[in-house]
Image (cartoon, grey):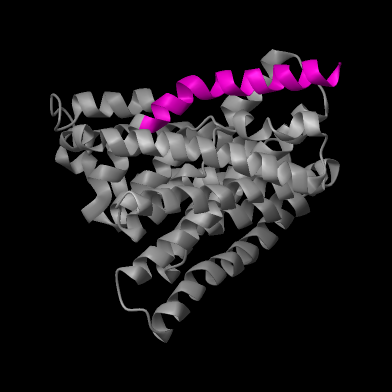
Amino acid sequence: MTLFLFLGLAVGPPGFDLIPADLRAWYDLLSVIALTMVAFLLGGGMHRDTLLQHGRAIVVISLTIVLATLSIVTIGFVAIGLPLGLALLLAAIATATAPAATNDVIHQSGVKNGFTKTLRGIVAIDDVWGLLGFSIVLVIVAQLNGHQDFAGLALAAWEIGGAIALGVAIGGPAAMLTGRLRDGEPLQIEALALVFLSAGLSLWLEVSFLITGMVVGAVIVNLATHHTKAFHEIEHIQWPFVVLFFILAGSSLDIGVAASVGGIGLAFIVLRSAARLAGGWLGATMAGVPRVQARWYGAALLPQAGVAIGMALIAAQRFPDWGGQIIALTIGTTVVFEVLGPFATLYAIKRTAREGSL
């Protein structure tokens, strides 16, 4: 994802300016489609078997880490002088992780114990809570920048509650349809139609397409007989949209603000790392996991990748006054967490394996 962004930076207006203006005009549409696909796949990680298998620890640890990240990062940024709205947006972005990177490290470590099993369950739903929290924060910050009245609160409730209702309304019939599909049917058309319907109706009804996509994915994965077909097709066809989305995103970057976020970027790295460590330990303690594992969940969940950048791009679109600062900071810190996060995950896994055998 970072490579695509830098490629867009090189071929866009900040670089060689090779992308036609007509193509750049597709950016808003592609961002909605690509991120609806991501939300759909994340919702697919909420299968009841996964939740039942890992149980209480998954829910408690994942929710605690998200809440701790939102709280600690927000308080930290407000303390150093950032506006409350900007602090909330950065805190919401900080909740995102990198499930693919974490799963790869677990697989490569060769360790199979209670820690890695629970960790797999957490990363399956961690970004779901993060996206839900991010959508709520978008509504809250919009209210902070506008008029806080009953009409505004009703609008916030509609954006979130309406998205959940829409997701159920689309996911239920889609689950029945997916269960009836057989090999040889036009599965890609079905999958694309599902994404376009979710995104299009969300925009038309002015509800969160992120929450709608997550709910649709969760409903389908739990109700459909052959749910894997729909998710496999989305995985196969999302890449052209994702590639174009991140390249066009890179072409829209304002590199002039990069130098101005150095101190804030360092603060983001420190605050997010502290929040993950504290939230992981607190959640694991509350869930009653073994003590030798409790202090390592936060470190294992440090990797951060494309979801955070996607959140930043949405936040930049919604709040353009802070847009350049949000994007530059998120890209810079995501590179750090992309590079160093997997090492922290591997170290945590090895330590739990070693301490568990003592």
Q: Is residue 56 visible?
A: yes
Residue 98 percent location from the top left of the image:
55, 32
Give the x, y percent position of residue 118.
Answer: 76, 35
Left or right: where 251 falls relative to 281: left
Name the one closer to the observer, 336 or 172.
336
Image position, residue 278 (x, y; %):
61, 41
How many numbered marks appear? Answer: 0
Of residues 308 and 286, the one drawn nearer to the viewer in this rendering: 286
Instruction: Inspect the magenta stretch and tell me whether residue 339 lies in it.
Output: yes
Residue toward you, 97 or 271: 271
Where is residue 2? Give x, y as percent: 38, 26
Please indicate, yes or no, whether residue 244 appears anywhere in the rendered image: no
Give the image quarter of residue 206: bottom left
Residue depicted at x 61% and y 27%: 102
> Residue 234's image quarter?
top right
Residue numbers of the magenta segment = 333-358
Taken as a whole, is the magenta stretch helix, strand or loop?
Answer: helix
